[in-house]
Amino acid sequence: MGMLLIDVGNTRIKWALTALPVAGELAGAWLESGSAAHGELVALSERWRKLTVTRILISNVAGEHIQERLQTLLETVFGIAVRPHWFASLPQLAGLRNAYRDPAQLGCDRFAAALGAQRLFPQQTLLVATCGTATTIDAVSADGVFSGGMILPGLGLMATSLARSTAQLPHITDHVQVNTLFADNTDDAIISGCINAQVGAIERAFGLLGRQAPGAHVLCVVAGGSAALIAPYLSIAHETVDNLVLIGLQTAAATLC
């Protein structure tokens, strides 16, 4: 028996099965895991039918439509006896205090990512950079306070927006590698601009956080679908973590479920 953790992002659904009780499990120690696009729910349901699940915890930032579809699918696969718990940001949970002006307004994925980062790197000043459809850059203090952050278009969205909104610029999809800062062709200039915009925002936030917490060792935790593309260009202390939101859900589950 296990708990099914589901992270519904803007473009993909990531999931993991963790053993019960979750409080004793190592962070990210999954029995099974996977991911799928929103349009692959039917295939996802076939995979889930093979699992023995007694609890379900879901972070969803993709809106009501996908929530309704997922709710129906879960009822079909596991029956109505296994009711999913839809994760939401709280004023305080698992040793993390949410200092957002309206704690409930904080995206549940950002709160979960902060929980996951704090679990992996306890009692450290953290900058949590989640690089997906949007890039979010959030600050967590060493004593467990989520103070807030910033949101900007993600790497893919930034490049797509530039291509769509600017005449005659190509749409970059096949590669995102910066060979030189000052590119001598348009494709590489777009790539350089988008990568360096992401890196610049993260490194600026890192510097500001360090000045706000003098003497603290600040660590940047990089996660999300574009993390592997952005992290190599960072010149600051950082760790790349896969499935950070799922680790946060695993952390929350010990208290919520």
Image (spheres, grey):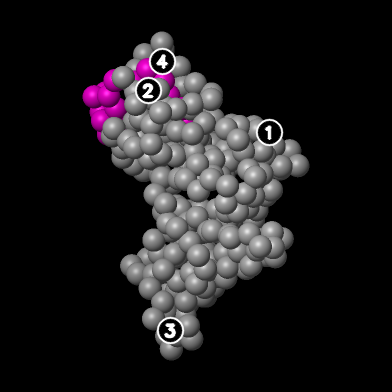
Residue type beneath disc 4: Val
Mark 3 crowd level (few <14, some 14–19, many ≥20, 10 Å Cα): few
What's the residue at 50%, 55% (across, down)? 221
Mark 1 → mark 2, Cα distance in angstroms: 26 Å
Q: Please give the label number shown on residue 91.
A: 1
Marks 2 and 3, how far apart in space? 49 Å
Tell me if mark 2 has few (under 14), some (14-19) or many (20+) residues whose alpha carbon lies within 10 angstroms of its own. Answer: some
Magenta span of residues: 39-58
User: For mark 4, does the 10 Å Cα neighbourhood hold few (<14), some (14 to 19), or many (20 or more) residues?
Assistant: some
What residue is pinned by disc 4?
82
Mark 2 or 4 closer to N-term? 2
Dot 3 falls on a residue whose secondary structure is: loop
Q: Secondary structure at mark 1?
A: loop
Amino acid type, label 2:
Leu
Query: Which residue is disc 3 drawn over?
Result: 180
Image depth: mark 2 or mark 3 in front: 2
Disc 4 and disc 1: Cα gap in Å? 27 Å
Q: Identify the residue position indicated by label 2 in the image.
A: 20
The spot of residue 230 in percent (x, y) is 45, 65
